[in-house]
Image: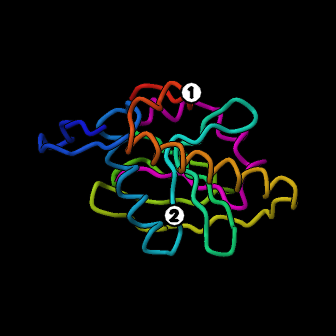
């Protein structure tokens, strides 16, 4: 399903299969996915995690490394949403992604930092690596693959959304 969303600067941005987000969060997400792709990772936005949380972006490298990127669209978003420590148990690397101008000094230093806009991004601070155990890595890799495959199936046949228990975006 493709929709058109108004971007931060008023320009139209096509949205294909993406969940509802603020325009700022969507544009940060788009830039982060472009950045991760340039670094050889593939990404799935809004990936449900085994603990009931949902990662803004989960990325998988060709070596099986799993990155989670938590998008913060505003200072208020950071202050009110403190679920991010619960993502550490499901990734090798954890990053915050914000747009330029965000007060980055308030973000935890034990996570990586990405600055992004709709056109791309930059890793400003690398994330410390905390290797997942083999069983957790396998579980997360399967979760990633199944989510990506389900979304592709719905792109081919939207009537499968209900059978695959995917939310309407």
Residue 39 vertical position relative to residue 32 in the rendered view, above or below? below
Q: Nearer the viewer, residue 91 or 16?
A: 16
Q: Is residue 168 part of the magenta span, yes or no?
A: no
Residue 21 x %, y %: 38, 33
| Nearer-the-camera pick, 5 or 79 | 5
Question: Which of the 4 image quadrants contains residue 117?
Answer: bottom left
**x and y, in percent, of residue 151 in the image:** 48, 43
Residue highlighted by disc 1: 165
Judge from the rendering whether residue 83 lies leftward or rightward of residue 41; answer left or right: right
Residue 35: x and y in percent read 42, 67
* Residue, disc 2: 42
Residue at 54% x, 50% y is: 149
In the image, residue 133 above or below residue 161: below
Circle 2 packing at 10 Å, graded few (<14), some (14-19), many (20+), is: some
Location of residue 8 (image quadrant)? top left
| Residue at 60% in and 36% down | 54
Q: Tell which tag, 2 or 1, sits nearer the viewer.
A: 1
């Amino acid at each position: 399903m493709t929709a058109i969303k108004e971007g931060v600067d008023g320009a139209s941005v096509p949205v294909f299969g993406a969940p509802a987000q603020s325009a700022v969060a969507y544009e940060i997400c788009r830039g982060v996915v472009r950045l991760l792709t340039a670094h050889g990772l593939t990404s799935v936005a809004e990936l449900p995690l085994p603990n009931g949380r949902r990662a803004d972006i989960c990325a998988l490298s060709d070596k099986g490394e799993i990155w989670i990127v938590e998008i913060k669209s505003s200072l208020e978003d950071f202050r009110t949403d403190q679920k991010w420590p619960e993502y550490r148990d499901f990734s090798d690397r954890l990053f915050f992604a914000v747009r330029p101008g965000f007060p980055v000094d308030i973000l935890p230093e034990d996570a990586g930092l990405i600055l992004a806009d709709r056109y791309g991004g930059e890793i400003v601070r690398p994330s410390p690596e905390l290797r997942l155990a083999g069983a957790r890595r396998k579980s997360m890799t399967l979760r990633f693959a199944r989510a990506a495959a389900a979304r592709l199936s719905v792109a081919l046949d939207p009537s499968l959304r209900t059978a695959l228990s995917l939310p309407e975006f």
